Amino acid sequence: MTNIIHWLLPKEEKFFLMLRDQASNVVEGANEFKNLIDNYNSLSDVKRGELVKKIKEIESKGDNIVHKIIGSLDKTFVTPIDKEDIHNLTSLLDDVIDLIYAASIRLKIFKIKIVDVHMKSSADIIQDTIKKIEMGVIGVSKLRSMNRFYIDIHTLENKADDLYHKALEDLFNNRNPVVIIKYKEIYDFLEDITDKCEDIANVIESIVVKHA
Amino acid sequence: MTNIIHWLLPKEEKFFLMLRDQASNVVEGANEFKNLIDNYNSLSDVKRGELVKKIKEIESKGDNIVHKIIGSLDKTFVTPIDKEDIHNLTSLLDDVIDLIYAASIRLKIFKIKIVDVHMKSSADIIQDTIKKIEMGVIGVSKLRSMNRFYIDIHTLENKADDLYHKALEDLFNNRNPVVIIKYKEIYDFLEDITDKCEDIANVIESIVVKHA
Amino acid sequence: MTNIIHWLLPKEEKFFLMLRDQASNVVEGANEFKNLIDNYNSLSDVKRGELVKKIKEIESKGDNIVHKIIGSLDKTFVTPIDKEDIHNLTSLLDDVIDLIYAASIRLKIFKIKIVDVHMKSSADIIQDTIKKIEMGVIGVSKLRSMNRFYIDIHTLENKADDLYHKALEDLFNNRNPVVIIKYKEIYDFLEDITDKCEDIANVIESIVVKHA
């Protein structure tokens, strides 16, 4: 990644500024999710509901940013960065915040009483991963060296994978099938989040390779 | 959306005619699905099977339309409308009819005895949404004003979301885990249908913005 | 499919060679999966674990091939074959090997004691389908007549669909909900594999039509 500055005309910078807005909104969602998970077991139902609602608002704010980015993209004829890549980045970042909300609202819908250790570790990994993703989105427009970035994301994704498999194994030692169904659905959403982050890292890598 | 007529050469009109065929086939599927759901509880197993088979035929007819559209697209070198958009539209419309069939056949496979109130409301929303989607597909090739269209689809999608969350909440009050598994899978398919319709509305919006 | 050789410059041939590598790696995965399934019921847990680990290694090898293909694609400016098609092919082949591993590791995580007749038939169909997919990937770069190929893949996919529906029906006659959850997840992964193969056949058909 040598000299990305040459192809960063003002028009393109606009897209990166919007993508950075979107990434920072997803970070906010991950922070609120970690806050919800860390304190869940000691909170009242009302307080839990308030925190889930806060995440819903972040998710809605994300929808507006997506709409703005796609709209600008559709009105722009030529971009030195592939439109497809910007489109993918924005749609993957949107998937991440949607999944964070999906996991959060399931806690409420399923009337989950106790958030377990796997969900807590998951919320930690998710927060770490998304903070790195934000750095990647900033880096791709700022000429930062990115090798560490890919390695870190893949390491975190592998960690999340192992955690997910361990969580499933423990879950099926539980004899209550309804508990299995509920927790499994939430684990699935959480695992999907780090998968999407790996997809985002791959798109960022593609952009960098194309403009090296 | 001012003057879409300028870029609608005969060759492109062909694609819109095929897409309208496809959309009208999906409407037929949604109508048959509503017919199945509305009458399900009072029908014999044989009659239920016949109605599911009818939906299977509509789904297969859809496959042929998709094959025709993609084949024509591959043989056409230049289009003023992005090929990608036509490709996405046709593939999303195909997903919708596939999901309608997937939900229908699950009623049979799972030996569902009673279709519940959530499925009935869902079939209503799905029918309304798909009728609007057909209007959108006609509109995009006919210069109709479309603002109302996006708002309507998003409103219907939100309604479907709320219904889905309410249905899940009620379902988990049921103590029978096998019933939960069966109904949850069908609810998931139904919820996915309105999600895909929202994706279709977004593609239509993209096409209109690009050619405004 | 008349004369594909004209557009096969050395640079493009490179992509087909890599895609053939990838396809042959997926065939290897399908063979190991069939080996695992065929012998599962008589193997020790240790031996089962070893076979799953072997599939994991094939999956990891696949990741490296994908990384190489996408990297080359990003560095190549003009290709007579659509980059999008190469990208889709490689990503779908990757999905197939990921799903084979996902099904395999679930046998271990869920502590499955008995592999049933549906899984065995599924492993057969999957092996047949993936061998044909490899022929398709070779064929698209080798000017072979391909009509038989599409028909074969669609026939196999229909067979897999019927098998899946029958397997679900049988499964729900089982009264143990935890067994239902475990086996259903594995069936779902297996069914998804043949779906992805049909998607691959469609991409291959698109490439051939565009260059006929």
Image: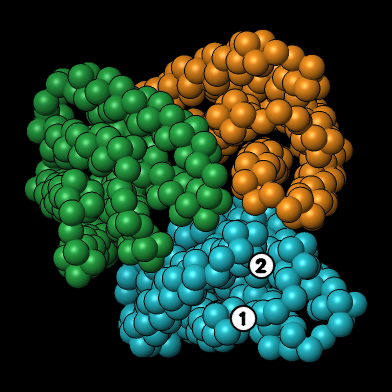
Chain colours: A green, B cyan, C orange
Query: Is A103 situated above or below C48?
Result: below
Q: Which mark is residue B116?
A: 1
Task: Read off the residue under disc 2.
Answer: B103
- Compared with residue B91, is residue B107 higher up or lower down, i.e. above or below? below
Direction from residue B205 to residue A142 in the image, left or right: left
Give, as a three-letter code, the residue at label 2.
Ala
Where is the N terminus of chain A found, in terms of image quarters? top left
Q: Nearer the viewer, residue C101 or A77?
A: C101
What label sits on residue A143 in the rendered view? none
Q: Residue at x 40, y 22 (%)?
A: C71
Q: Residue furthest right?
A: B46
The structure residue drawn at horizontal position 48% and vertical position 74%, both measured from the top left corner, is B170
| Residue nearest the observer in this picture, C142 or B170 | B170
Q: Is residue C33 visible?
A: yes
On the rendered image, what quadrant is the C terminus of chain A found in?
top left
Residue at image coords 43%, 22%: C67
Vertical placement of residue A54 versus A79, above or below: below
Q: Residues within 10 Å of mark 1 (few under 14, many from 20)?
A: some
Q: Secondary structure at mark 2?
A: helix
Does residue A82 show up?
Answer: no
Q: Secondary structure at mark 1?
A: loop
Residue B61: quadrant of the picture = bottom right
